[in-house]
Image (cartoon, rainbow, N blue to C red):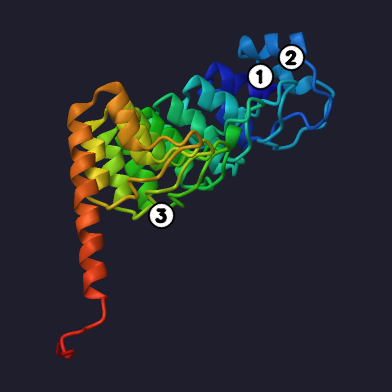
Amino acid sequence: MPLLFTCYQGYTDMVQWILDNEAEVNHSEKVNNTDLFEAWSQKLYCILRWEHRWTNHVDLDDINCFTPLHLAVLRGHADIVQMLLMKNADVDLCFNSGFSNFCRAQQNERNDMFSMLLKKSRLDRCILNGICPLSVASEQGNIDIVKLLLEKNPTVDLRDNIGMTALYIACWKGHTTIMGMLLEKDPNIDLCNKYGKSPLFIASQEGHTDIVRLLLKRNPDIDLCDNDGLNALYVACYYGYTTIVIMLLEKESESRFMSQIRMLSSAPDYSFYTY
């Protein structure tokens, strides 16, 4: 199909010509026509002589379920992406692997294409394995993209198929700056994955001292245990992260002290009794 092939090859002028002249094959037969592709690869405009019905259908896919926008994003043709978006191409159609155009641009670290797609994509649309765009950006450590996403106020506590949030992933990967940005959106810092591991647990397990310090300032539940009955202090001790162990012990002492204070403050007043 002409539009698919020209988007893949990056023939900007030909893509524009097709879109302007509303030329695209409109049929459901998904085959790879060698003669058709060869003609376009030689940039021959005589392709219109083919006996097909033509219409402007920018989301028509090929045998592999690739749309023109998929191919343009995959190949990094930002100018063609812009053209297709102007023709209202569906940004949220996924690749056959389950990834969206939005997340593919993130993976390729193409912030220019990402910004264009961001204007038309659904921020909280989860893809393969339930991963949302914010989680993808947090995993990759792309600060600029995380910032752009957070400006659009996405749901920061969205969890993937194994229960990981963007905050959990940032804590796991050790992306301190991103983790701090996510904390500003007031997420639930005690959300655990399906294995019972919290952000504090995974940060302690991986030895991310700065992240543990930031989390402790938010007063997480330091006694949360995973499905095996282990907590953050246990794994920090097991892996020998001395600084983290000290911080957790200090927090535990502080928590116990505050609990005692609260208990004393709520106790009955017996001062009026005389003995």
**Residue under the point 15% across and 86% down:** 271
Secondary structure of the residue carrying tag 1 is helix
**How far across and how far down the image is residue 140, in percent?**
38, 28
Q: Provide the residue designation for mark 2.
A: 36
**How far across and how far down the image is residue 238, in percent?**
31, 24
Mark 1 vs mark 2, foreground winner is 2
**How far across and how far down the image is residue 126, in percent?**
57, 41
Residue type (three-letter) at the residue carrying disc 1: Tyr
**Sequence-wise first label, 3 or 2:** 2
> Image quadrant for the N terminus?
top right
**Residue under the point 46% across and 30% down:** 105
Question: Dot 1, how many residues are within 10 Å of its Cα: few (below 14), some (14-19), or many (20+)?
Answer: few
Between 269 and 169, the residue placed more toward the observer is 269
**Residue under the point 66% across and 19% down:** 45
Between 212 and 135, the residue placed more toward the observer is 212
Question: Dot 3, how many residues are within 10 Å of its Cα: few (below 14), some (14-19), or many (20+)?
Answer: few
> Does residue 243 lie above or below 249 as drawn?
above
The CA span between labels 3 and 2 is 45 Å
**Residue under the point 71% across and 28% down:** 61
Secondary structure of the residue carrying tag 2 is helix
Q: Provide the residue designation for mark 3.
A: 153
Which residue is outermost to the front? 275
Q: Provide the residue designation for mark 1.
A: 45
